[in-house]
Image (spheres, rainbow, N blue to C red):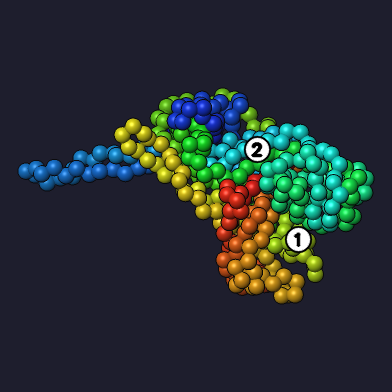
Amino acid sequence: MSGQITRNNRVLVGKLESTYGVDANPTGAVNAIRVTDLSIKPVLGNQKRINYIRGFLGIGRNVRTELYRSITFKVDMVSALTPGQAPPYGFILRACGMAETLLAAAVTGTLQAGSTATTLKLPAAASAINGAYIGAKSRITGGLGSGQAASGIAYDGVSKILTLDRPLATVPDGTSAVSIDPFARYNPISDLGTMEAATFYYYTGNKVRHKLLGCRGNAKWDASSKDTGFIEFEMFGLYGGVADASEASVVTTNWVDPWEVGFGRTYGQFFGKQFTGGATGLQMGKFSLDLGHKPKYRSVVGFQGINSTDRESTGSITLDATLVAEQDIWAIVTGSTTGPIGIEQPDTNNGSVRLDVPKADPTDADDGDDEGISINNIPFDCMPVLGNDELYYTCR
C-alpha cells in the first residue's frame, strides 16, 4: 500500500548554527537526539483575511503574515559519557539561552586552613569567579578526611570558600588534598546578542523531513519519584521547508541511560535540610523547574527570527509534611525567606546531574495527600544573586 507513513519510526536531529537562521546540516550519525514525547506544530503564525467588496457573497482571500514552527520533546537527565564534556543535548540548552562552562580536567591541590564541616577553603589557585564551582563534586583525596565527597552550592571567589550541600563527618585541615571533578555546567544568560540558536530536522516516518531553522526555546526539568528525571524542551524555529527524505544512519550510543528517581539513588536538600528522611532529614516526592524563557517569533522588514527577551525561572517541590521542630516551612514561606534548593540524580555511567537554585524564594505551601501521607507542595521563584545565576544545571 503506497502513500502511508507510519508514526512510530520518527527521527530528530539537531545542531547549533554558526550563523543565525542558516542551516547547520545536522546528521543522524553525529547529531541524533534520543527523545520521548516528540511532537511538532508544522505551521504557526498569524494570517490576514482580506474581504474585498464584491458583487456576490463568499469568503475572502487569506494571506499568511507570519510563518514559523515549534517542536516539543523530552530527553533524559543524564551526564556525558566522559566527565567534563558536554552531554549530547548540551547544544539544546545553549539554544535555550544558557551559557556552557566545561571543566575538562579536575582542579586539584591542598586545602588552605579554615575548612569546616560544611565549607572548604580551596587552594589559593582556585577560581576567582564567584559561583565557579556551584554544582561541582568536591572530593577529599588525601590527608585528614580522605574519602569524603560533597557538592558545592555556593562559592566565594575572593575567600575561596566553597559551601557544601551536606556536612562532612570529618573536617579536613590545611594538609588535606582536594579535587574538584570535571563537569559541564549551564546557567542562564541575558544578552540576546550572545544567545545561540539551532537547526532541527524532524523526520516523520523517517520519510518526510521538516526543517526548523534559527530555533530558540525553553527548558523544563522534572525529577519526581516513580519516574526517571527528564528535561522537556519546547523549541520555536523558522519554517525551513518540507521534503521527502530519510536519515539512513541514526547513532545514539553516545547517550547515557538514566536511573529512576527515588530512595537510595537521588539526593538533595531544601534550605540546608537533606533528603535523607528520619528525624534529621526530609523526604522529597516531586521536583520541577522551569527556566522560564519566553521565545517569540518576530518579523519586520530586514529581520525574521525567534527572540527571547524575558525570563522568569520558577519551580516547585513536594515534601512529606514534618513537625515544625524538624523543618518549619511555614516560617520560611510566610517570612519571605530565601535559601538554597538542590537535587542530584545519578545515571548508569557512574555520573550524575545536579540542579541548584542558590536563592529560592518559596511563595506558598499547601496541605495535600499522597497515599495517605500528608505532603506540602511548595512553589518557589528562582531569584538571581548577582545576575544570570538563579539556577545551575551541572553534568559531572
Name the residue carrying label 2: 101
Specify whether residue 371 is in view. no
> Quick one: 212 or 393, which is closer to the camera?
393
Residue 168 position, x and y percent, is: 85, 55
Amino acid type assigned to the residue bearing label 2 in the image: Thr
- Identify the residue shown where x is 76% and y is 47%: 160
- Identify the residue shown where x is 58% and y is 56%: 383
**Dots 1 and 2: beta carbons under 8 Å?**
no
Element type where label 2 sits in the image: strand
Residue 185 position, x and y percent, is: 66, 41
Judge left or right: residue 217 versus residue 356: left
Judge left or right: residue 75 versus residue 6: right
Splitting the image into 4 quarters, where does residue 15 fall?
top right
In the displayed image of the protein, which residue is found farthest to the right? 143
Name the residue carrying label 1: 274
Amino acid type assigned to the residue bearing label 1 in the image: Gln
Work out which quarter of the rendered image holds the C terminus and state it.
top right
Does residue 390 lie above or below 13 as drawn? below
Specify whether residue 386 is in view. yes
Does residue 334 lie above or below 23 as drawn? below
For marks 1 and 2, the one nearer the N-term is 2
Work out which quarter of the rendered image holds the N terminus and state it.
top left
Residue 93 position, x and y percent, is: 58, 40
Distance from disc 1 to disc 2, alpha carbons, whole Å, reads 27 Å
In the displayed image of the protein, which residue is found farthest to the bottom? 324
- Identify the residue shown where x is 70% and y is 61%: 270
